[in-house]
Amino acid sequence: MSETAHIPQLRFPEFSGGWEENKLGDIATFSKGKGISKSDIDDDGQLECIRYGELYTTYNEIIKDIHSRANIAKDDTNLSKSGDVIIPASGETAIDIATASCVLKDGVAIGGDLNIIRSDVDGVFNAYYLNNKHKHSIARLSQGSSVIHLYPKHLEILKLNLPTKPEQQKIAAFLTAVDNKIEQLSKKQELLGEYKKGLMQQIFSQATRFKADDDSEFPDWEERVLGDYLAHKSKKNKNNEVDLVLSVSNKKGFITQDEQFDGYQVASKDLTNYKIVEKGEYAYNPSRINVGSIARLKNNTIGIVSPMYVVFKLKNLDSIFFDNLYQTHLFKHLIKVGCSGSVRDSLNFNDMADFVFSFPSLEEQAKIANFLSSIDNKIEQVGKQLDESKQFKKALLQQMFV
């Protein structure tokens, strides 16, 4: 080991001096996991186990709670020691294979196609370090074309800059606390979403009803076709007066073409045939309604969408009430039914207009809209906190390692 002037930008005040440069092969031993088949997996299996695919789908840098068990003998597998770091030995792309996780438990069966790194370096620190500062370095070491491989001989030559063990542990504990906060916020966001789904089921099935401000009952809901509340629009951009090209995405609603295609322009130069959509109006792609979404234009005054899009506006229907209506299971079921008879699996405006629902009065719609909006606001607040925490972690990872 040779000490060089490797000093991180961000550091705890009680530590000083340069981090030491090491070759991973000089400070670690390497082994491989052994295959665990699907038939071995059993909820009541005798051994906890980690399988290759779970590094991508289930775990992050720290593996504390094991999600799978298997019926295999200890002698037929390679068991973990707390602090081991595991990295895939093969994958589809070089950058995907560079995924490091620390197992914080003894005696866990490590599945096949996984590299096991064992050293005196704090495992949690090492996982964060390898998975972030050295992600691209590991990717460059891997080999292959159709299938990418990463062997111990590749990892052995990786150069690491390491602080003292106490500093490793301090960094590991701090980043773990940040990840715990992110996990808590993610869970809170998920629970709020599930809570809202349950309430929507109660509201739109009329199991839960609202009352007027004077505590009087609202009228019974009236069964009508959706077309009674919609007005189809097909205004074209004839004079090319609008140049903001929009699309509808599944998660974000209306997005610009730049957002959808990473700055690449796919719309034709002649936009005269594109349809105009104004603030408060709705649009959807009829041929992608099952994977896409209906969206209301909120953040722009005016824009244009592809000629294939359906554009419409509401009449005598609360927009927030409708925003929630088209997220219900019944609405999605009717979309599937409406698309099933189409050769191109699309949903035109007239098909949607024939959907039958029960509708409350405008006054009760407003009550429902305000109530559900209050939950949406809470979900949005948690979402912002989650994004801020993720950005904070990203900044830390860029500055705490060298």
Image: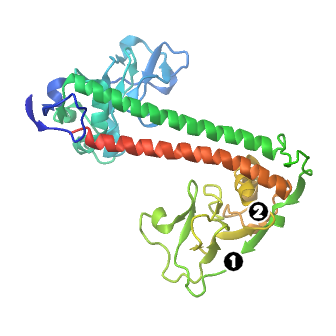
Q: Does residue 59 appear in this view?
A: no
Give, as a three-letter code, the residue at label 2: Met
User: For the N terminus, which image quadrant?
Assistant: top left
Q: Does residue 161 appear in this view?
A: yes
In the picture of the structure, the residue carrying the numbered disc 1 is 234
SS label for mark 2: helix
Front in this rendered view, residue 269 or 325: 325
User: For the C terminus, which image quadrant?
Assistant: top left
Determine whether 351 is above or below 394 in the image: below
Give, as a three-letter code, the residue at label 1: Ser
Determine whether 161 is above or below 123 in the image: below
Q: Residues within 10 Å of mark 2 (few under 14, many from 20)?
A: some
Residue 101, image x, y percentages: 35, 30
Coloration mode: rainbow
Q: Residue at x 33, y 47 (%)?
A: 146
Q: CA distance from mark 1 to mark 2?
A: 16 Å
Determine whether 378 is above or below 346 in the image: above
Residue 318, image x, y percentages: 76, 60
Determine whether 109 is above or below 391 in the image: above
- Residue 291 lies in what quarter of the image? bottom right
SS label for mark 1: loop
Asked whether, in this view, residue 102 is left or right of residue 40, the answer is left
Q: Which numbered circle lies on residue 163?
A: none
Q: Residue at x 88, y 59 (%)?
A: 224
Q: Residue at x 79, y 64 (%)?
A: 353
Q: Residues within 10 Å of mark 1 (few under 14, many from 20)?
A: some
In front: mark 1 or mark 2? 1
Farthest residue toward the bottom? Answer: 239
The answer to which of marks 1 and 2 sits earlier in the sequence is 1
Q: Which numbered circle lies on residue 352?
A: 2
